[in-house]
Image (tube, rainbow, N blue to C red):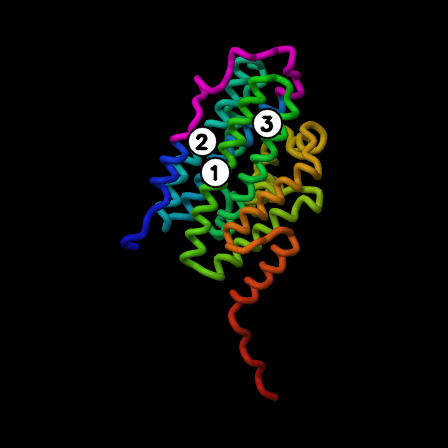
């Protein structure tokens, strides 16, 4: 539309200003072999494979946003930085645990087609995923004892937070264009993603079913060498406990307050607002036939 300002140019510049260098910002020379166990190295391998799934996610985003060149252009930045996360984890293993480096076959296994889905819901899904991943990586940085990998997880966790901020801008733009129906779609997914921890399984795009024809083996995690790895990593290794989960929920609620321009401090308040929006967005019911 003439006169409408694109988000991509400014997002590119803002992310470019803070982009870290794998050569200059990772303190490779500080590596302490005594502080890296085989168990820890294996988790790095699995995270490297999981990050590689930005490839099919980008293919999905480009396919489902063909009418949005602004957002599709931003995918060039998101895809680059996400693949860089996989690359830096693999570089760490190449230097210090070469036998653990993922094979091309293991990486390619997570590249499969995602079914088409509503673009707005997918956007909110990935926004929540970035917030959750930021906290997972921060928790992982505390669990690890080797200084170089602690720094790497700190770097990539900050990227995930910035990606969430970029998605938030696109969601605000969508609301300005679409109104209550857009808000209703966002609130529905936000509540789903924020409430999932109560059921004992925090949702993230990598453990959601995305291809009906491949069910039940249609999640990114199901394509890993050990499909049960994620829950083991969270529950038994980095111990992503209730206190960490509260940080995720609090951050999601804070951002929902910004997105919807109203204070939302609890999941109950988010649910009430979701119901208000769903009612406002629903078409008015047809009158019952006489007699």
Q: CA distance from mark 3 to mark 1?
A: 21 Å
Is 1 situated left or right of 232 in this image? left
Q: CA distance from mark 2 to mark 1?
A: 9 Å
What number of labels is visible?
Answer: 3
* Residue with the mark numbered 3: 46
User: Disc number at residue 224?
Assistant: none
* Residue with the mark numbered 2: 81
- Of tags 2 and 1, the one toward the viewer is 1
Q: Residue furthest left?
A: 2
Helix, strand or loop for disc 1: helix
Q: Earlier in the sequence, mark 3 or mark 1?
A: 3
Name the residue: 38% across, 43% down: 72
Horizontal and vertical percent position of residue 86: 50, 27
The answer to whether residue 96 of the structure is visible from this angle is yes
Q: Nearer the viewer, residue 225 or 274?
A: 274
Is 65 situated left or right of 240 in this image? left
* Residue with the mark numbered 1: 163
- Which image quadrant: the N terminus? bottom left
Q: Give the residues drawn in magenta, as a range.
A: 17-41
Residues at circles 2 and 1 in contact by the CB criterion of under 8 Å? yes
The answer to whether residue 109 of the structure is visible from this angle is no
Does the stretch in magenta take in 163? Answer: no
Name the residue: 51% across, 16% down: 27
């Amino acid at each position: 539309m003439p006169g409408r300002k694109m988000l991509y140019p400014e997002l590119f510049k803002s992310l470019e200003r803070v982009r870290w260098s794998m050569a200059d910002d990772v303190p490779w020379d500080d590596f302490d072999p005594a502080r890296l166990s085989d168990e820890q190295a294996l988790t790095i391998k699995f995270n490297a494979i999981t990050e590689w799934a930005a490839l099919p996610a980008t293919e999905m985003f480009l396919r489902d946003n063909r009418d949005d060149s602004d957002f599709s252009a931003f995918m060039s930045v998101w895809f680059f930085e996400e693949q860089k996360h996989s690359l830096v984890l693999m570089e760490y293993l190449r230097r210090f645990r070469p036998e653990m480096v993922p094979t091309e076959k293991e990486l390619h296994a997570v590249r499969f087609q995602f079914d088409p889905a509503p673009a707005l819901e997918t956007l909110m899904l990935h926004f929540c995923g970035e917030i959750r991943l930021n906290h997972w990586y921060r928790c992982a940085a505390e669990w690890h004892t080797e200084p170089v990998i602690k720094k790497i997880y700190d770097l990539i966790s900050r990227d995930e937070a910035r990606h969430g901020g970029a998605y938030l801008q696109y969601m605000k733009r969508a609301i300005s264009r679409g109104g209550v129906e857009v808000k209703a779609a966002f609130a529905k997914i936000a509540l789903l993603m924020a409430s999932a921890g109560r059921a004992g399984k925090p949702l993230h795009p990598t453990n959601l079913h995305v291809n009906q024809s491949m069910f039940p083996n249609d999640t990114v995690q199901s394509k890993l060498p050990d499909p049960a790895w994620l829950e083991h990593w969270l529950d038994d290794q980095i111990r992503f406990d209730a206190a960490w989960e509260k940080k995720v929920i609090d951050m999601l609620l804070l951002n929902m307050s910004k997105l919807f321009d109203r204070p939302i401090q609890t999941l109950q308040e988010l649910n009430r607002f979701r119901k208000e929006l769903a009612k406002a967005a629903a078409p008015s019911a047809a009158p019952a036939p006489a007699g």
